[in-house]
Amino acid sequence: MASRDPLPFDPIMRAAELWDERIGPARTMAAVTSVMRVQQILLSAVDGALRPHGLTFARYEALVLLTFARSGRLPMRVMGERLQLHPTSVTNIVDRLQADGLARRVPHPTDRRATLVEITPTGSALREQATASVMAIDFGLAGLSPDEETQLTTLLGQVRRAAGDFT
C-alpha cells in the first residue's frame, strides 16, 4: 500500500516529542495528526480498489445508499442528508452516475417538486463488484482486530457526535 519504503521511526511520535519539548502537551496534536494520516491511507486504499470499477468513493457511497433504500430509490434531498453532502455535491454525483448508466432520475410520484434517484441494474451489478473489491482489502483498515475496529468506530463516533454530526 505504501508507495515508498517505511520510515525507521514514527514521524508523528517524533513530532509529538518535539512538540512536548518546545510547545506544550502534544497528546491532542498527535491524535489528530494520526487520524489525518490514517484518513490518507484509507482513502488511498479505497480509491485504489474502486478505480478499476470507474468509481470514486463518493459515487460508491451513493450507490450503496441507493441499495439500502427498500425501493432502490431516494429523493436527492434525502441522499444529501444521509451522505452529509451539500446539494450541489449530490447533484454532481448523480449527474456522473446517470451519465454512466448507474442511476437515473425519476419523478417523485406525489411531490412534483422532488426528484428521486434510482439505482439501475447496471449500477447494482457494479456496486456489488466494487463492494467485493473494497471488502477484499478490508477498506484499507489493516492492523486491527474486530474488537479494535468496533472500539475505533465508537471513539470516532463520540468525536462526530460532539461535532454535531448526529444526536
Image: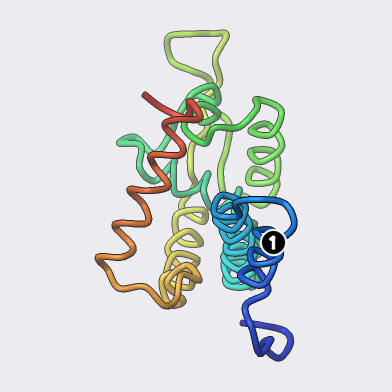
Specify whether 129 is left or right of 87: left
Report the residue at 64% width, 84% height from top. Answer: 9
Q: Quadrant of the C terminus?
A: top left
Report the residue at 48% width, 17% height from top. Answer: 108
Quarter of the image for residue 158 reads top left
Front-most of residues 147 and 69? 147
Q: Quadrant of the N terminus?
A: bottom right
Q: Where residue 150 sits: x, y (%)?
A: 29, 58
Q: Where residue 100 sits: x, y (%)?
A: 67, 52
Report the residue at 55% width, 29% height from top. Answer: 80
Q: How many numbered discs?
A: 1
Q: Where residue 148 sits: x, y (%)?
A: 31, 65
Report the residue at 60% width, 48% height from top. Answer: 58
Mark 1, other Cα within 10 Å: few <14 / some 14–19 / many ≥20: few
Front-most of residues 37 and 106? 37
Q: Where residue 154 sits: x, y (%)?
A: 33, 48
Specify whether 136 is left or right of 42: left
Q: Is residue 37 above or below residue 66?
A: below
Front-most of residues 16 and 20? 20
Secondary structure found at label 1: helix
Badge 1 is on which residue? 21
Q: Is residue 77 above or below residue 155?
A: above
Residue at far front of view: 21
Q: Is residue 165 above or below residue 15?
A: above
Specify whether 129 is left or right of 91: left
Q: Say which amino acid is labelled 1.
A: Glu
Specify whether 121 is left or right of 10: left
